[in-house]
Amino acid sequence: MADTQAAHVAIKTDIVVIGAGQAGLSAAYHLKRLGIAPGRGFVVLDQNSAPGGAWQHRWPSLTLSTVNRIHDLPGMAFAEAVPVASETVEAAVAVPQYFAAYEQAFELPVYRPVTVKVVCERGGRLRVETDREAFSARGIINATGTWETPYIPEYPGRELFAGRQLHTHDYTSAAEFAGQHVLIVGGGISALQLLNEISFVTRTTWVTRRPPEFRAGPFDQEAGRAAVALVEARVRQGLPPNSVVSVTGLPVTPMVEAMRARGVLERQPMFSEITPTGVRWADGRTLDVDVILWCTGFRSSLDHLAPLLLRNEAGGITMTGRLATQVAADPRIHLVGYGPSASTVGANRAGSAAAGELSRFLSLAT
């Protein structure tokens, strides 16, 4: 009887931060700066066994020289924690090292590995059920990101393909595809990076739903703010968010210029169906391939919040607050790393906004 009762006892805290990636650590840092005590005031739950968020799962060839950009966390520059990192160091090594040093320097209360299973209403509080303990909170800052929810669109015949299919999430090395014809699907930065790598070792075909838009000239702060504003406007209307990169275009980097020179960027339109041996276009053309690599992005990992009924009929979540991190239907809940804050620089600002707005809403800070 005692064990059964213990299983239903929840650890009380004011705020639970779910996720210890860029956004989660930023939120935790700002909560502590607001004078909210670790433990009784807030805790951070991380499903990974070590610091680093999704960065620790990136493919080995993603190095500090090829990653889009690593933004500093608030209060500690990347160079302070990883002062002698070479450009050839794997991002999956350097960034976790940075996050680990950050957690230690600011004594952030990160508990791991703890996987949140579900969040539900319980007696005016939010009950957070995990694979270990249960927590009872007054507010939630959800920072689970997207890495655990890879997206593969439905196309007729996908289950009939006799070759190999994988997502960016599962990619490790171009060498494993040697001698095979790889169809790369997607028009984002990751698709370009993997297309570049794989094209050096084997035959590739690149397919995108829309013609890729390459951005000429520098991408300055003004352009960045304009792009984020477009995504923010969608979530404030309750529409599902587009990715920030979908409105920024693809940067013309030296890698892109070299790919053009090699003829790798000869893009094909999206096929209409998948066959047992490859793909078929609407005009009847077919192509046999050995591998389909879906570089089709990710969706926000929010299934654990489903009992709270935050989504509207359009499938989106109406957001409000200074940086659109607060759920309009339930101001106790903030989503960071969602919509306009899905980028690393956006995650930093969203963590600050969420910490401040939620703590004030709960009367924990002025």
Image (spheres, rainbow, N blue to C red):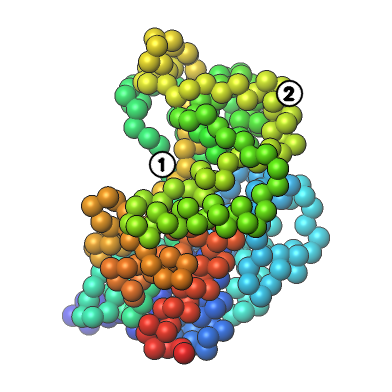
Q: Residue at x 63, y 25 (%)?
A: 265
Is residue 263 positioned above or below 318 on the image? Answer: above
Q: Residue at x 44, y 78 (%)?
A: 357
Q: Residue at x 59, y 61 (%)?
A: 345
22 vs 77, left or right, is: left
Compare residues 133 and 366 and report the one nearer the observer: 366
Residue 283 position by quadrant: top left
* Circle 2 SS class: helix
Of mark 1 and mark 2, the one earlier in the sequence is: 1
Residue under label 1: 151
Residue 287 horizontal/vertical position (percent): 47, 13
Q: Marks 1/2: CA distance?
A: 31 Å
Is residue 91 positioned above or below 212 on the image? Answer: below
Asked whether residue 70 is in view, the answer is yes
248 vs 330, left or right, is: right
Compare residues 212 and 186 and report the one nearer the observer: 212
Residue 298 horizontal/vertical position (percent): 45, 46
Q: Residue at x 55, y 68 (%)?
A: 349
Other residues around mark 1 within 10 Å, as few (<14) / some (14–19) / many (≥20) = some
Q: How many marks?
A: 2
Is residue 100 positioned above or below 202 on the image? Answer: below
Residue 343 horizontal/vertical position (percent): 55, 56
Compare residues 4 and 182 and report the one nearer the observer: 182
**Mark 1 residue type:** Tyr
Residue under label 2: 261
Name of the residue lying farthest toward the top: 284
Which corner quadrant holds the N terminus? bottom left
Asked whether residue 54 is in view, the answer is no
- Mark 1 vs mark 2: give the one in front: 2
* Residues at circles 1 and 2 in contact by the CB criterion of under 8 Å: no
